[in-house]
Amino acid sequence: MCLGRTHALSAGAAYAALGEFVFHQRPAVLLAGTAIACGAGVLPDMDTVGSTVARSFGAATECIAYGVRAISGGHREGTHTGVGDAVCAGLAVLAIALEGVHFRAWHHELSAGRIVLGAYLAILFGAGMMALRILHRGNGRRYLLAAAAAGAMAWTGFDAGGIAWAILLGTAVHCFGDMLTKHGVAWHLVTTVATEWNPEVLTRIIHEAMKARDFPAVVAALKVLAVTDPVQAQAVYDTIEIGLQIAADVGE
């Protein structure tokens, strides 16, 4: 069993490591992306009423959870798949694409895309803070901080190109975390628990992911390989580390 705090921490750590050591992001972008990834780290559990993300904004998110549970088929079903990860990221892409769609309200022109994106980010920030027990005794202050941060990002367009990637990474890390538990999940390619993965297949997946520069997939596959074959996982990790060091030396 994985708790919300574990999911949020692992997703945030994965994003922070990639952002800092692979993509060399600016501090502000790194901080924003890490915060989004923390929230996305608990987002797949929106299929369960009573989960951290379902309670993040009270009745509003609980109502969403009821709908998600009905559509996804229950806990650890639709939202815990590759399709679910893509949909979570795609919602952010859709919101950004709708930025140019406006409507009038209260004698003002408002952007539908910015409103949707702001609401989505508010849920992510609120869920992340709740999972990490930030302002956990003051719901009102947490709501206000999450809404303010989300509104600022949505209205300024800050790091708009990285939001979907942070969400995709966070949800993928969540799925792999649950995959390592006893019950497992119906994840991207198989419906099995980690102990049934073939180390040779995992190693090929890692190599192909490296070629495609799909670093979240590399990290996730390494986690599973570490459970099935720790020695092989260490050997693959050492090879990757040496390769990255050589690439960095050549780049200099």
Image (tube, grey):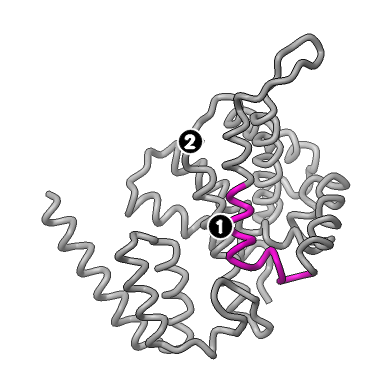
Residue 77 inside the magenta-drawn segment = yes
Residue 239 spot, x, y in % from top left: 24, 75
* Front one among 10 and 162: 162
- Please report whichever mark, 1 or 2, sits nearer to the chain's N-terminal start: 2
Q: Main secondary structure of the magenta part?
A: helix
CA gap between label 1 and label 2 equals 16 Å
Residue 121 located left or right of residue 163: right
The amino acid type of the residue labelled 2 equals Asp
Residue 91 spot, x, y in % from top left: 64, 45
From what the image shows, is residue 226 above or below residue 101?
A: below
Residue at 55% from the left image edge and 63% from the top image edge: 172
The residue carrying mark 1 is 170
From what the image shows, is residue 72 above or below residue 32?
A: below
Report the span colored magenta: 74-90
Residue 74 located left or right of residue 158: right
* Front one among 175 and 17: 175
* Front one among 114 and 226: 114
Residue 187 spot, x, y in % from top left: 60, 73
Q: Quadrant of the N terminus?
A: bottom right
The amino acid type of the residue labelled 1 equals Gly
The residue carrying mark 2 is 159
Residue 44 located left or right of residue 23: right
